[in-house]
Amino acid sequence: MSVNLTKPQMMLHQMVTDFADKKVKPFDMQIDKDRDYPKELWEGIVNTGFLGLTVPEEFGGAEFDAIASSQTVYDLAVRNASIAFTLEGHYKTVDQVIKYATPALKEKYLPQANHRIFGFSSTEPQGGSNIMGNTANAVKEGEKWILNGNKTMITNGGLAEVYCVLLKTSPNELSCFLVDEDMPGFKHGKREEFIGMNGTPVGEIFLENVVVTEDHLLGKLGQGVEIGDQAHYDARILMGAIAAGIAEHALTIAVDYAKQREAIDTPIIQLHSIQTKITEIAIAKENAQLLYQEAAKLKVEGKPYAKVATMAKSYGSRASVIAADHALQVLGGYGYSREYPVEHLIRDSRALQIAEGSLEKMMIEITKEVVKEREE
Ligand SMILES: Cc1cc2nc3c(=O)[nH]c(=O)nc-3n(C[C@H](O)[C@H](O)[C@H](O)COP(=O)(O)OP(=O)(O)OC[C@H]3O[C@@H](n4cnc5c(N)ncnc54)[C@H](O)[C@@H]3O)c2cc1C
């Protein structure tokens, strides 16, 4: 661990690992198969205060920082990546409400973030990478905004009740609005048939003449791209933590299996080729962890963290797929079987190369930062 946890963070870490061992770990494969969380697990997530982890104390939350939230997401991802992904979608959205909402909107919605799931919505059916090509829009009428459009692929879409949505407010301008599923004209659409992260619904919403007051605008008019970027950077720290968690999960499965599986009268862990794979998984996990922890530390210290957060997700998203693939190979035929928990780690980790900015887009961003640093 590259960060030193404070005493409250240590206590949180202990509580999360106890919870995850009892309520998450036993259901890892069931969550993947059922495409849902067991009722008891979900009630535990809500009742134990996971949703309010980052909500400021004045709004009833626990006000933990990015070091604690990423540690929590990691601790859960080691047992099941999907539940960690659900919280990632919630935390990064709550972060933007904390940063950009008016005092009145915070007063109304942040207490609700302790028990209602939030989601961040940018992608539309015609494209996710090119957000200026979006068509969903907000039009001002007197003191109100009228919102219209179709948004897709929202992490927690359907499960979330509150959404931060990027909408066109003029042809070259995006702004961010907070909408509630209870508003007339708001409808949930279909859930995506994704191959992994199966506990987390990823779905669409429809806005049909949804009317909101001025204070549902987050930040300033036209600040949508900045808020979307900010949501990505906050999310990428957590995505890095999920990637490291998946790699750790793969490592545990591979080591446990290799110690008991025999070939030529010796456990396969004695074989050089197996040791190579276990070493690669361990290095992948360690590197992924160092990167997201460094990004979280920079965020907590109030330093720029966008580049390292993007590196954490960029590296972690590839490292976790490779780690899961090595683990599959260690388990041989059983690794390829749905009866063992390795194959879903590959499907889960693959999502991390697309959600919160595709690998290709992140590489462009990192290169831009690296070039800029050398010109300064
Ligand atoms: C599990 C999951 C969860 C998601 N959660 C959310 C969410 O919570 N909220 C949300 O708004 N969206 C979410 N998304 C959508 C995600 O953000 C988009 O899938 C992503 O931005 C890519 O957009 P796209 O799928 O439309 O692909 P496209 O934008 O059509 O891209 C297709 C391919 O072209 C590449 N490409 C596109 N433009 C460029 C470029 N300029 N330079 C280089 N390569 C490029 C992409 O990298 C990709 O490989 C989620 C997606 C997944 C899989």
Image: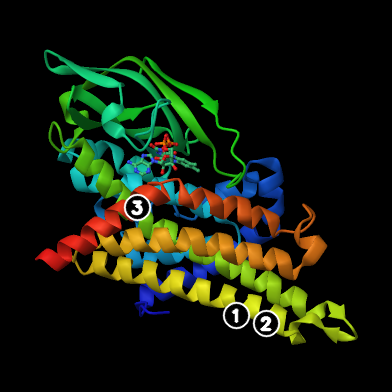
Which label's residue is closer to the chain start, 2 or 3? 2
Crowdedness near tag 1: few (<14), some (14–19) or many (≥20) residues, C-alpha within 10 Å: some
Q: Secondary structure at mark 3?
A: helix
- The residue labelled by disc 2 is 275
Distance from disc 1 to disc 2, alpha carbons, whole Å, reads: 6 Å
Q: Nearer the viewer, residue 234 or 99?
A: 234
Q: Is residue 58 depicted above or below 246 in this figure?
A: above
Residue type pointed to by label 2: Gln
Label 1 CB sits under 8 Å from any ligand 1 atom: no
Q: Work out how far the residue at label 3 is from the one at label 1, CA to CA, in angstroms.
A: 27 Å
| Circles 1 and 2: CB atoms closer than 8 Å | yes
Name the residue carrying label 3. 362
Residue 353 spot, x, y in % from top left: 47, 51
Q: Earlier in the sequence, mark 3 or mark 1?
A: 1
Neighbor class of circle 2 (other Cα within 10 Å; few <14, some 14-19, many 20+) is some
Mark 1 — residue? Answer: 279
Q: Pick the residue in front: 239 or 183.
A: 239
Mark 1 secondary-structure assignment: helix
In the image, what residue occupies the spot 32% across and 28% down?
Answer: 179
